Image: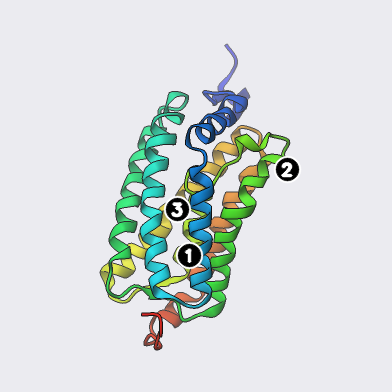
């Protein structure tokens, strides 16, 4: 028997990369054309946030809840768990995230951030998840039918959620704590996904990690100074 130190992380992988990407193909075929509708809905949310609309923010965060729940049930439990038993734990975390997003969307102190640069970076991450992330399949040589789509695949859903939550501020410890927790859970998933992709030998693992690093850096650099200010008047409230 070979010594343990001769093993590489890829030797411990329980599934072949081809099997993993095939899951997204089956997932997309089963749910089409709903991914297209979801993309259009969140593009409309992004346009509303360009106008500093708090109702658009609330609607977007509320709409994220069923997206996380759908990923938990339809992808993680029904498909990914068949090749990776740890996906059942991830599904539970995604379900908790869905519930937290629903609660946050109803928080009375929730508002769009007063910091324009933070909002622009958040919208950039959301646009990345909606429009560019699915095209990665073509970039790395996979068919478009295996694309990871926002609201239906875990990685773009987590990245888009980080972007949308960067556009949000809340006063009061419960709402602020919930906002930070939801961001942290999305960041943790991005890190786990990056590790999984690297273990599979895919350089695509850099993408969720970079998105998580951007969200963490932006939220850490600006929130304290901005969030302590009194919210300015918002005509869309």
How far is the residue under mark 1 from the one under mark 2?
Answer: 27 Å
Q: Position of residue 131 (x, y in %)?
A: 62, 54
Are there few (<14), some (14-19), or many (20+) residues within 10 Å of tag 1?
many
Q: Position of residue 128 (x, y in %)?
A: 61, 57
User: Would you place residue 154 above or below residue 213 in this image?
Assistant: above
Q: Quadrant of the C terminus?
A: bottom left
* Residue at the outermost top position: 1
Q: Earlier in the sequence, mark 2 or mark 3?
A: 2
Foreground disc of the pair 1, 2:
1
Q: Earlier in the sequence, mark 1 or mark 3?
A: 1
Q: Position of residue 207 (x, y in %)?
A: 62, 50
**Contact check, label 1 and label 3, Cβ < 8 Å:** no
Q: Position of residue 120 (x, y in %)?
A: 57, 72
Q: Residue at x 47, y 70 (%)?
A: 167
Q: Which residue is mark 2?
A: 139
Identify the mark at residue 184; answer none if there is no mark: none
Q: Residue at x 42, y 69 (%)?
A: 56
Q: Would residue 203 be found to the left or right of residue 83 on screen? A: right
Q: Which residue is mark 3?
A: 186
How far is the residue under mark 2 from the one under mark 3?
Answer: 24 Å
Badge 1 marks a residue whose secondary structure is helix
Q: Which residue is mark 1?
A: 45
Foreground disc of the pair 1, 3:
1
Q: Would residue 7 be found to the left or right of residue 67 on screen? A: right
Q: Would residue 62 be found to the left or right of residue 118 on screen? A: left
């Amino acid at each position: 028997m070979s010594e343990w130190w001769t093993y590489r992380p890829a030797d411990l992988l329980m599934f072949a990369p081809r099997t993993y990407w095939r899951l997204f193909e089956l997932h997309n075929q089963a749910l089409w054309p709903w991914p297209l509708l979801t993309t259009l809905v969140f593009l409309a949310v992004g346009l509303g946030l360009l106008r500093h609309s708090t109702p658009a923010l609330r609607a977007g965060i509320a709409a994220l809840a069923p997206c996380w729940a759908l990923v938990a049930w339809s992808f993680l439990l029904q498909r990914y768990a068949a090749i990776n038993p740890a996906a059942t734990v991830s599904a539970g975390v995604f379900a908790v995230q869905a519930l937290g997003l629903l609660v946050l969307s109803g928080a009375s102190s929730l508002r769009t951030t007063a910091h324009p640069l933070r909002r622009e970076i958040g919208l950039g991450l959301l646009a990345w998840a909606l429009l560019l992330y699915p095209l990665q399949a073509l970039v790395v040589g996979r068919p478009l039918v295996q694309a990871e789509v926002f609201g239906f695949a875990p990685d773009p859903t987590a990245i888009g959620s980080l972007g949308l939550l960067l556009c949000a501020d809340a006063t009061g410890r419960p709402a602020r704590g919930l906002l930070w927790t939801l961001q942290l859970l999305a960041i943790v998933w991005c890190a786990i996904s990056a590790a999984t992709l690297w273990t599979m030998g895919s350089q695509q693992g850099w993408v969720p990690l970079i998105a998580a690093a951007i969200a963490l850096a932006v939220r850490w650099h600006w929130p304290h100074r901005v969030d302590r200010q009194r919210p300015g008047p918002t005509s869309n409230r």
